Amino acid sequence: MKPYETESPQERFDHDRNNNVQIQSRIEPLARLKGPLVGKRFHLVGIGGCGMSAVARLLLDSGAKVSGSDMNAFAGAGALVEAGAAVHISHDASHLRDDVDLVVRSAAVPDSNPEIVAATCKGMRVITYAELLGELTLSHKGVCIAGTHGKSTTSALAAYMLKHGGMDPSFVVGAVSDQLGGSSGVGSGDRIVVEACEYDRSFLHLHPHSAAILNIEADHLDCFKDIDDICATFKAFAESVAEDGILTVNFEDDLSLRLAMGAKCRVETFGFTAGADWRAVDLRAERGSYSFSLMYDGRVYDDCRVKLAGEYNVSNALAAAALAHHAGASVESIVEAMGTFEGVHRRMTCRGTWKGATVVDDYAHHPTEIRVTLNALRHRYAPNRMWVVFQPHQASRTHQLMEGFGRAFSDADVVLVPDIYSVRDSQEDLERANSSRLVERLTHAGVESRYLPTFDDVRAHLDGHVSDGDCVVTMGAGDVWKVADNLVGRV
């Protein structure tokens, strides 16, 4: 077997266990959910997605019975199996039991999927992942974090702040937090923290009591016509926040600030410049992390710190702070929490060392995310050379954002580009963009880069060139993390 192939969910469980992915065993019903979950049977089509696997765990922890399927083995499958889920690697009508109460589908799952066809023929109720989250936010006070970038980190931090402040929220986040015990959890409190994704307008199914808009930028242009279409969708999200709730928006992001004016709730801002309600001043950098003073409501809180690298994570922390404070957490407890929060998986995650080089894995797949993440990593590790293994995500995104990618890698010394991770591209998309063309664009921009089709090709090249004091960064929303794990596993 090749190093990157996985045969079964059990192997993924072994991977999770060996990498200290914590498994929650607590079973506690979500009493506020419409209709008791205990004993209800859910089938999730596309269970391997970040959000889908998180909500699967939440359902299991609520006493429900869960089954699901995905086309490929995925990180976290073993943990779901251990928690009691029946996970199938492939899609087939035989995976759907006759006693299923509700079928939940990922946005990427087409109507032609054999399990969706079978569910429809059997008269079963079929809803999307976003619709299920919407039901959860109806039964709780939803704390919903939206934005083109930073949603997972900010959502996890908001949940962590609420826990630290003496509250016990439920949460569904698109990434694993060891400190929270996973990517989802069932709490006894009246709030649920939800990562609110704009893809396919999913977050319009939510019912936020409070919300944040971190930033707005062109992305997901396979389902939005242009930036105006994206802004209209975020505007509708802002206007959906409950009147007695709060919307917090980025004071430095003009689009977010402009759209917030239509909200019917209270609006607070966060940022670094005068006029922001939640403001960080006197920033002091040390190895990429920042200490600062927090100004809010006429008071100054000194000696604040965010452990995560990058100034943008200070901004994320301010947004989480505003939401947590509105929910009842004291500013003092919020400051303590932001200083001890360690982030989520696949966000500048150090996987170990190899040949004296630091190996880091990150989820960034949009030009802006790549640029700020590489800059933060360079300040944190000060490497001799920074090697970036970037796996493009979707041929359509690669084509639409090609110019942006050309400007995103200025902090990299060498960029290695394997084939595109493509799961929903059309044939036209595949013909318009490929990794070889991206390398041509990077080379034209003065970035040393190389097209290496497979992960084995990438590993062989790194093996012959990486040396002590370097940093190897695997980056992308697909399965490029396997390269980092393989390198560290060879130590």
Image: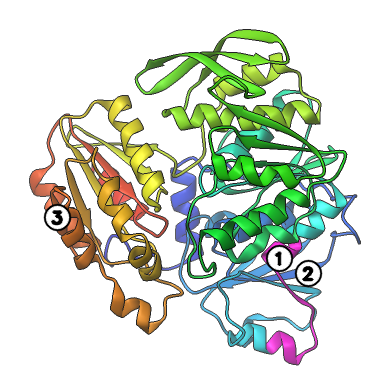
Where 442 falls versus 315 (above or below)?
below
Residue sitting at 24 percent across and 37 percent down? 411
Where 293 falls versus 135 (above or below)?
above
Q: Amino acid at mark 1?
A: Val
Expressed as whole percent of the image width and height from the top left, the position of residue 403 reads: 29, 57
Q: Secondary structure at mark 1?
A: strand
Q: How many marks?
A: 3
- Verify CB contact (< 8 Å) between mark 1 and mark 2: yes
Q: Which mark is residue 444?
A: 3
Closer to the chain start, of discs 3 and 1, is: 1
Residue located beneath label 1 in the image = 66
Residue located beneath label 2 in the image = 41
The answer for how far apart the CA atoms under marks 3 and 2 are is 54 Å
The answer for how far apart the CA atoms under marks 1 and 2 are is 6 Å
Applied colour scheme? rainbow
Closer to the chain start, of discs 1 and 2, is: 2
Residue sitting at 27 percent across and 66 percent down? 419
Closer to the chain start, of discs 3 and 2, is: 2
Q: Residues within 10 Å of mark 2 (few under 14, many from 20)?
A: some
Tell me the magenta residue range.
118-132
